[in-house]
């Protein structure tokens, strides 16, 4: 501080007559404001890059869709704060906040609606992962709020549902434009469908924690304008060139191979001869006409819990020594926000709960068909004539409510952290008893007494940089930064 003070004092006499000194120090080639058509792509790309990466490292592995073969702490329930989730998503919120501010100033209603949808999606992921989080006061650096309070999760959920409803109205107004939209190419109706579908997801996730969840769910369904086909999926197409590629493409082979198809998903799909196997995983023999697969156990890498599994599918990583995605007539994997398959499974579960009066099997069947179509499966290489043949003879035909959970779980492959959030909800609805989820069980050799962790712990930097609010948040969950702490969603 002394150096800075002396420097300013020494300059003062020299600048007493320096009219226009500030203007002289402005760089005319460096903009002070960034256009929304630059900020919006950055916000979308940053959020999707973070969530694809964390789906690979966390979401799929926690939910046993895939398994870690190295550094198995995630599978073994020996968790830390996973700070890259916190940092990556709050970073994307910075750009989203600027887009929203500019949209309001320009009276661009549809762009404001887009910003609200993105903001709500990111905040929903954060609160689902951590519980109480900085929300209403977050991204407040411009107002010198560097220590935001942690809002209770129930309050956050209430506001997110309200904000997504407001976004729907703004997007329906038709006022303004959505420049720089690299998700839906400026289509406001697509953003509306995503907003309303996200409302369905939030209501199902909250479930009985919101007494009127079923009524609100039914109203949204009755109003329509939700994702209704694979053409309306909210999926992000990455570019071919670095640094905007699908996040797994640049990985070293060893890092990519640290995750494999899990024994849990492999066993279930093998039992049904599910053709998604050749999309989720690469055949061990690299023969797509007569494929052979294997599954790795989730959990500690001990002798009892160790088994090699098939590499993840060709769409997730380029290996010149093996069949490429292009040779299969497929594209590189996309970043998934929400799909038609998920919406159909939400409707199926709502029918099970009595929230809507539709037949359960209709939506259940539609969900499986939509997932198969999205992955462009090859039925014939698995011995099926097509979807109808598969549904009728594979054993997946609807028989009991947990069938919806099973097929929804399979369809959520690489859907951010949603596989974990759904597994946790089913675990909670089963009174924390794995027997209530017939296709699932605790990870082998786990270090948490067979209990599924209920949240991510808060990053260490929060304890040092936002200590008072951090301590307040801990008091609401029992006083400890513990991954078994019961957040509002599971109380």
Image (cartoon, rainbow, N blue to C red):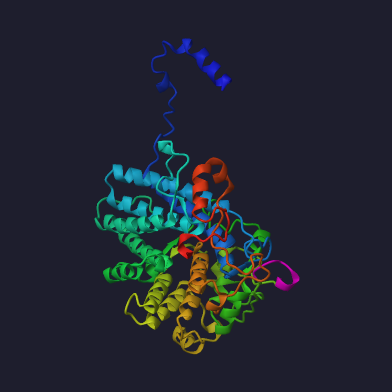
Quadrant including the N terminus: top right
Percent from the top left, x then y, of residue 410? 51, 74
Percent from the top left, x then y, of residue 486? 51, 61
Q: Main secondary structure of the magenta part?
A: loop
Percent from the top left, x then y, of residue 99? 37, 46
Image position of 219 with respect to 141: above or below: below
Q: Is residue 185 visible?
A: no
In this rendering, would 135 be left or right of 308? Answer: left
Q: In this view of the protein, which residue sits in the foreground, 24 or 109?
A: 109
Image position of 313 with respect to 168: above or below: below
Asked if the magenta segment contains residue 299, the reply would be: yes
Task: Report the magenta residues as a range.
Answer: 298-306
Asked if the magenta segment contains residue 490, the reply would be: no
Q: Residue at x 33, y 80 (%)?
A: 358
Rendered image quadrant of residue 354: bottom left
Rendered image quadrant of residue 338: bottom left
């Amino acid at each position: 501080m002394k150096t800075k003070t002396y420097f300013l004092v020494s300059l003062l006499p020299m600048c007493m007559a320096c009219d226009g000194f500030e203007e002289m120090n402005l760089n005319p080639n460096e903009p002070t404001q960034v256009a929304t058509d630059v900020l919006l792509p950055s916000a979308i790309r940053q959020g999707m890059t973070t969530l694809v990466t964390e789906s690979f490292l966390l979401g799929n592995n926690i939910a046993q869709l895939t398994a870690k073969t190295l550094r198995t702490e995630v599978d073994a329930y020996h968790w830390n704060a996973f700070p890259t989730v916190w940092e990556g998503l709050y970073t994307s919120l910075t750009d989203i906040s600027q887009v929203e501010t500019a949209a309001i100033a320009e009276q661009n209603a549809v762009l404001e609606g887009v910003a609200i949808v993105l903001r709500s999606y990111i905040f929903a992921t954060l609160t689902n992962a951590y519980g109480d989080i900085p929300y209403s006061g977050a991204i407040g650096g411009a107002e010198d709020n560097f220590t935001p309070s942690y809002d209770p999760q129930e309050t956050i959920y209430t506001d997110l549902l309200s904000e997504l409803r407001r976004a729907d109205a703004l997007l329906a107004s038709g006022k303004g434009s959505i420049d720089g939209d690299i998700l839906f190419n400026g289509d406001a109706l697509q953003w509306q469908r995503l907003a309303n579908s996200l409302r369905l997801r939030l209501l199902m996730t909250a479930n009985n924690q919101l007494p009127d969840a079923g009524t609100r769910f039914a109203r949204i369904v009755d109003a329509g304008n939700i994702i209704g086909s694979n053409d309306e999926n909210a999926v992000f197409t990455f570019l071919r060139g670095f640094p905007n590629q699908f996040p797994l493409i640049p990985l070293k082979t060893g890092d990519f191979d640290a995750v494999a198809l899990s024994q849990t998903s492999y066993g279930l799909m093998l039992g049904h001869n599910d053709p998604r196997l050749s999309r989720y995983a690469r055949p061990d023999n690299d023969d797509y006409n007569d494929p052979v697969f294997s599954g790795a156990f989730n959990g500690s890498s001990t002798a009892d819990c160790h088994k090699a599994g098939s590499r993840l599918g060709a769409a997730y990583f380029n290996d010149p020594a093996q069949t490429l995605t292009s040779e299969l007539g497929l594209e590189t994997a996309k970043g998934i926000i929400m799909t038609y398959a998920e919406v159909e499974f939400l409707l199926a579960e709502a029918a099970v709960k009595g929230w809507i009066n539709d037949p359960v099997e209709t939506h259940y069947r539609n969900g499986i068909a939509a997932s198969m179509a999205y992955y462009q499966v090859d039925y014939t290489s698995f011995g099926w004539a097509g979807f109808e043949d598969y549904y009728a003879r594979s054993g997946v035909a609807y028989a009991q409510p947990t069938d919806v959970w099973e097929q929804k779980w399979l369809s959520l492959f690489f859907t951010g952290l949603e596989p974990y959030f759904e597994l946790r909800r089913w675990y909670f609805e089963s009174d924390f008893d794995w027997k209530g989820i017939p296709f699932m069980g605790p990870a082998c050799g786990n270090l948490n007494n067979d209990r599924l962790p209920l949240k991510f712990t808060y990053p260490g930097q929060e304890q040092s940089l936002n200590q008072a609010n951090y301590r307040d948040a801990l008091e609401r969950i029992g006083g400890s930064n513990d991954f078994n702490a019961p957040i509002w969603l599971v109380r």
